[in-house]
Image (spheres, grey):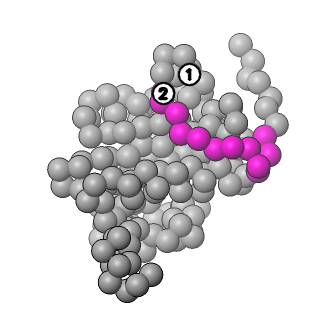
Amino acid sequence: MSEKNIQLTEDAVVSLREVTKDNLGEILRLRVKPGQEKFVATNATSIAEAHYEEKAWFRAIYADDTPVGFLMLYDDPETTDYFLWRLMIDGRYQGLGFGERAAKLLIDYVRALPGATELMVSYVPEEGNPEPFYTRLGFVHTGEIHDGEKVMKLFFESADSNEETGS
């Protein structure tokens, strides 16, 4: 079966959708650009891991009605630990802003969870890594290293701090 050649533009509507038996094949066929494989696991690996980790929350990233990526969150409401575990955009659709808009949707989702004060992410510290992308989103380095990856956090302002400052 040949791949559809979909022309998407930057103004496509980005959404996060459940991975189902109907879209699983399309999600599994998404690939990062050559050379980026060391930065993110395949979607097949991620989905398999998610099925064995009850705290995994994962979604397909769509631009209009075209699957363009995948993300996965480690979601532990008991400890309010939220970790952006995976984020990938297919190489064909990189540079169109879909990853940033998907990350912002995820950030809004986490920010709305009870007790959420921060979102963590980590990256492989090699040339071509996504650190500039996460920095643009407001993540800051923690100085921590986890499994050889540098850890960053995005801190959420609480409603209480807004009330205290009158913002």
Residue at 56% x, 29% y: name it. 27
Q: Main secondary structure of the magenta part?
A: loop
Q: Is residue 45 left or right of residue 77?
A: right
Check disc 1: other Cα within 10 Å, few if <14, some if 14-19, many if 20+. few
Q: Which residues are magenta?
A: 8-19
Q: CA distance from mark 2 to mark 1?
A: 6 Å
Q: Amino acid at mark 1?
A: Asn
Q: Is residue 153 left or right of residue 108?
A: left
Residue at 69% x, 43% y: name it. 13
Determine which quarter of the picture holds residue 79.
Answer: bottom left
- Residue sitting farthest toward the left: 78
Work out whether residue 119 or residue 125 is closer to the camera in this orientation and state it: 119
**Circle 1: element type:** loop
Residue named by callout 2: 19
Q: Position of residue 146 (x, y in %)?
A: 29, 61
Residue at 54% x, 45% y: name it. 88
Check disc 2: other Cα within 10 Å, few if <14, some if 14-19, many if 20+. some
Residue named by callout 1: 23
Pointer 2 and pointer 1: residues touching (CB < 8 Å)? yes
Residue at 65% x, 49% y: name it. 98
